[in-house]
Each structure stands twice: as C-alpha cells, then as structure tokens.
C-alpha cells in the first residue's frame, strides 16, 4: 500500500504529510508490513493499534510453547494482555470481529465435530478426560522445565498428551465467561490457557459496579490474573498435611474492551489492580484518512485478511501438537536492542505510582516482533525489516498507556484536592474573625500538619477563593463573582452545605 492509497479530509486532498521521526501525531505507514497497513486503513484506525491488537489475539491463542528466543537465549512469550479504552465502539467491534471471528468459528466447528464423533466422551470431557489431560500436560511441562531435558521422555509425554486429546473439545478462546462456568470451560481448553475475550467490558463492569454477584465476578477476575503471576506452588495436600503437592497457577491472556469513561474507576478499584498491573491499556485512536477503495486495493485487502487467517491456522495447529510457533534471533539487531533499552529507561524513570501499572510493558518489542514476523515474514528471513514498525508500535503503546494512567491518577488527585478545598472553606467560615493566622486555621483540624494543609491553601488561592500572605501570616477569603465550576457542582449537589462569609473589610 502506498501513501497515495490513503485519502484524508477535504482540507488535505493531496494526501497526508509524512510526519517527522519525532512526530507521534500521525501514523508512519511506510514502516509497517502489508497486513497491519491494509487492516488499519480499511478500518480507519492506527496501524500501531492493529499490530498490538493482533499480537493480543495471536499471542493469546499461541499456547504455552510459542516463543521468541532472544539474543542471549532468553525466551519471550508473545501473549499480550490488553485492555482497550474504547472511544470508538464501532471501530473496536469491527476490529474484534475481524480478529476473533475465525477463532469463534473454529471453536464451534471443533465442538460439533467432537460431539458427532463421540457424544459420550464429549459429555465426560469436564471430568475424567479433562483431569487426564491436565495431568499429562503438567508432566510435559515439568519435563520441558528440567535443566537437562530427556528428549525421549519429552516425546513420550507429548505422545501421551495427544492420545488423551483424541475426541476432546479443543477450545482455545472463551468469550465473556460467567463466574460459575469459567473453571469448567477452562478445563476444556488446550493446556488450560484460554484467551479471554470480552468485547463488551462486562467482566470489569460487574467487578467495579454494583451487581448481585459482584464478589463472584471479582473472584473470576482474580483467577484470570492469578495474582499477576503464574508458575507452580508447593502446598500441603488437603488429606494429608505432611504431604506436599504441586498446584499450577494459570494466568490467562485477556483482551477486554472497556468504555473509556470507566477506565478511571476500573484502574483504581482494588479488585481490578492485577488486571492493569499485567496488561496494557490502549485507546482506540482513529486516523484522519481512509483507504481508497480501488479494485486493486480491494483485492489486496482481501488477500491480507487471508494472510491473517493463515497465521491463525498456523498458531492453532502448532498449539494442538504442543510445538508452538517459535522464532529465534540468530544475530543481534542493534536497533532493536537500543530501542528496547530506551523503553525500559522510560518506564524506570516514571513516578512509583505510575510505574506500578507498567508491568505489562516489559519486553513489549519481542512480543510485537513475533507477530510482525508471523504476519508478513513467516519464515523469519528479513527480521530487520520488521524492527522499525515494532519499535514505533512499542513507543506508541508505552506513551498511550502512561498517558491514560497518568491522566487517571491526576484526575483522582484533583478530585481529592477539590474535596479538601471545600472542607477548608468550611473551616475558614467557622473562624470568627478574618483575616486569621495559619495557626488559627490549623487548630480547626484534628491533624495540624503544615505539609498537608499548605497545598490545599495554595490551591484555594490559585482558584481565587482565598488570600494568603506567608510573610505577614495572614489568611482571608476573597469575594468571587463567579465561583469555579467544581465548587458550583458540589454546592448544587448538596444545597446549603457551604456558605461563604461576607468579605472582610480590611482584606486586600
């Protein structure tokens, strides 16, 4: 796709200007491969969002054995937990349908096939057969985790696992699961790592908003994130306290659409904390132009969607035979290494309250690179060509995530400061004589910390509601012909709760 294939608004009929390297306002189409470019232009969204979204779907479906081996031999799993701050519901729904529609069809087709082949085994797959597969899968994971792996033992465990999976429901994705059915459905998923897709945000809504079964939904969210980590725990068996048994914790990949207006309340809700500590928060930002629908572009777009479905098929077949789609970095790419180091420095330099929510941004470039290769360089022969788009997408994701988190935290601090300012106005109104000294105001509080009270007083002065002269130790209220909007809103919400005294004659 060429730049001329994108048209913009009437104010710019000749096509969009190519942004500077440091400009993040518009997409840099020439960096991206064919697949994200055509899908993004067709849906009128940013190519960075498309690449991140497809990484969330493909990486979440890839299973436990998919990976990208780094330059030092480290393994990066491609799963990308994603929460979409939905500003454009129609575009987000279209993207979700394009990305997950074939997977839903695959699930339904395999389920019908399993029922037709063996209804009895299908009816038992939540119990005996599910337990056998889980045990066999755990033995295989333990064999693969050994320092000195026994290839014959690994092959035998894989063969045993495939034998158990015959006539078994090979689901790979769960759409908005209910709390009462999640565990049973997860037992029917290959390797028990389903991709949780919730395009309506019902999961988070029922966690943060009043609901008859709110505690059950909160427990479901906790099981999905599993304390923001996964692995194997050693614990005492219920029947014998002296016997230790192994229990594997599973953190399921997720793709959740959340209305933008609920992002703030969800981010700060205690039950949703793990979700945002392991996931990435992105907005649905659109573009100013769209794809010129010529016959050539239409045919190319159809081919691109076909390439994406081929990538899905490769992922699903590799997952079923426990191999997983894997790529290995055969030689270092300085641009990629430097770009990832800069992103790490950007995250490390954030305030602690923001950095807490940035755990999902670590190792973002390798996960995006895995998807870029799977989509447009299946054999991994031209890895360097995918690096610019990967770094551009990683930078965009990091900055958008930090921006959304920072805006939310600043809004919370602003709201807390406004509430404290209303209280301070009441305290000043209770003082018999104005102007007063700072000590007179402090005595109205149970906790008389100057470090706490000074910022509130400075805020009132900045809003034109109070006057404070530290040199003369003088505080007074000021006349306001038009109150700030936040104060008007609080007064209208609670009539008569706040009455300002008349202006002091000797106030400046």
Image (tube, rainbow, N blue to C red):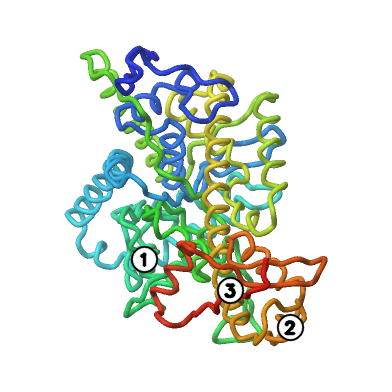
Mark 1 and mark 3: span between their CA atoms?
A: 47 Å
Image quarter where the N terminus lies is top left
Please determine whether, in this image, residue 215 is positioned above or below residue 272. below
Residue 389 is situated, as x and y percent measured from the top left of the image, at 52, 26
Please determine whether, in this image, residue 441 is positioned above or below residue 130. below
| 1 or 3: tag closer to the N-terminus | 1
- Answer yes or no: is residue 224 visible: no
Residue 253 is situated, as x and y percent measured from the top left of the image, at 46, 53
Q: Alpha-carbon neighbours of circle 3 within 10 Å: few (<14), some, or many (≥20)? A: some
Mark whose residue sits in front, 3 or 2: 3
State yes or no: discs 1 and 3 in contact (Cβ < 8 Å).
Answer: no
- Can you identify the residue that label 1 sits on? 205
Mark whose residue sits in front, 2 or 1: 2
Q: Residue at x 32, y 70 (%)?
A: 181
Mark whose residue sits in front, 1 or 3: 3
Residue 48 is situated, as x and y percent measured from the top left of the image, at 46, 33
| Figure quadrant of residue 339 | top right
- Can you identify the residue that label 3 sits on? 503
Residue 368 horizontal side relative to residue 91, left or right: right
Residue 13 is situated, as x and y percent measured from the top left of the image, at 32, 15
Q: The residue tagged with tag 2: helix, strand or loop?
A: helix
Numbered tag placed on residue 440 in the rendering: 2
| 2 or 1: tag closer to the N-terminus | 1
| Figure quadrant of residue 127 | bottom left
Mark 3 and mark 2: span between their CA atoms?
A: 18 Å
Q: Residue at x 27, y 44 (%)?
A: 90
Q: Residue at x 75, y 72 (%)?
A: 474
Q: The residue tagged with tag 3: helix, strand or loop?
A: loop
Q: Nearer the viewer, residue 28 or 18?
A: 18
């Amino acid at each position: 796709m060429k730049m001329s294939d994108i048209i913009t608004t009437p104010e710019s009929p000749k096509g969009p200007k190519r942004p500077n390297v440091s400009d993040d306002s518009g997409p840099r189409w020439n960096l991206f491969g064919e697949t994200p470019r055509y899908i993004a232009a067709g849906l009128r969204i940013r190519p960075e969002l498309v690449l991140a979204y497809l990484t969330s779907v493909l990486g979440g479906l890839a299973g436990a054995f998919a990976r990208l081996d780094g330059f030092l031999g480290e393994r990066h799993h491609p799963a990308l937990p994603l929460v979409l701050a939905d500003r454009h519901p129609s575009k987000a729904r279209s993207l979700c349908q394009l990305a997950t529609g074939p997977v839903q069809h695959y699930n339904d087709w395999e389920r019908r096939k399993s029922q037709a082949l063996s209804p009895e085994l299908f009816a038992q797959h939540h119990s005996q057969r599910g337990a056998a597969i889980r045990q066999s899968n755990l033995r295989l994971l333990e064999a693969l985790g050994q320092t000195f792996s026994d290839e014959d033992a690994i092959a035998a465990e894989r063969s045993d696992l495939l034998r158990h999976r015959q006539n078994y429901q090979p689901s790979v994705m769960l759409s908005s699961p209910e709390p009462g059915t999640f565990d049973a459905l997860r037992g029917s998923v290959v390797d028990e790592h389903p991709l949780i897709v919730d395009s309506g945000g019902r999961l988070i809504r029922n966690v943060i908003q009043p609901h008859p079964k709110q505690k059950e939904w909160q427990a479901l969210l906790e099981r999905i994130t599993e304390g923001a980590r996964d692995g194997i725990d050693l614990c005492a068996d219920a029947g014998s306290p002296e016997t230790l048994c192994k229990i594997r914790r599973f953190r399921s990949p997720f793709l959740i659409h959340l209305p933008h207006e609920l992002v703030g309340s969800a981010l700060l809700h205690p039950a949703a904390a793990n979700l945002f500590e392991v996931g990435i928060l992105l907005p649905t930002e659109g573009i100013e132009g769209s794809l010129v629908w010529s016959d050539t572009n239409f045919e190319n777009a159809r081919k691109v969607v076909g390439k994406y479905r081929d990538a899905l098929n490769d992922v699903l077949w590799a997952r079923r035979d426990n191999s997983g789609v894997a790529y290995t970095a055969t030689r270092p790419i300085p641009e990629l290494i430097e770009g990832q180091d800069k992103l790490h420095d950007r995250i490390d330099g954030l305030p602690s309250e923001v950095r807490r929510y940035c755990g999902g941004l670590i190792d973002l470039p390798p996960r995006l690179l895995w998807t870029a290769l799977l989509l447009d360089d299946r054999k991994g022969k031209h890895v360097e060509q995918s690096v610019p788009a990967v770094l551009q997408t990683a930078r965009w994701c990091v900055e958008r995530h930090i921006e959304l988190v920072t805006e939310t935290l600043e809004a919370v601090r602003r709201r807390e400061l406004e509430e404290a300012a209303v209280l301070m106005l009441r305290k000043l109104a209770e003082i018999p004589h104005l102007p007063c000294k700072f000590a007179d105001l402090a005595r109205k509080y149970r906790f008389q910390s100057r470090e706490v009270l000074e910022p509130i007083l400075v805020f009132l002065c900045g809003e034109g509601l109070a006057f404070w002269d530290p040199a003369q130790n003088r505080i007074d209220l000021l006349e306001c012909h038009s109150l700030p909007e936040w104060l008007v809103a609080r007064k209208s919400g609670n009539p008569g709760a706040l009455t300002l005294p008349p202006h002091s004659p000797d106030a400046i």
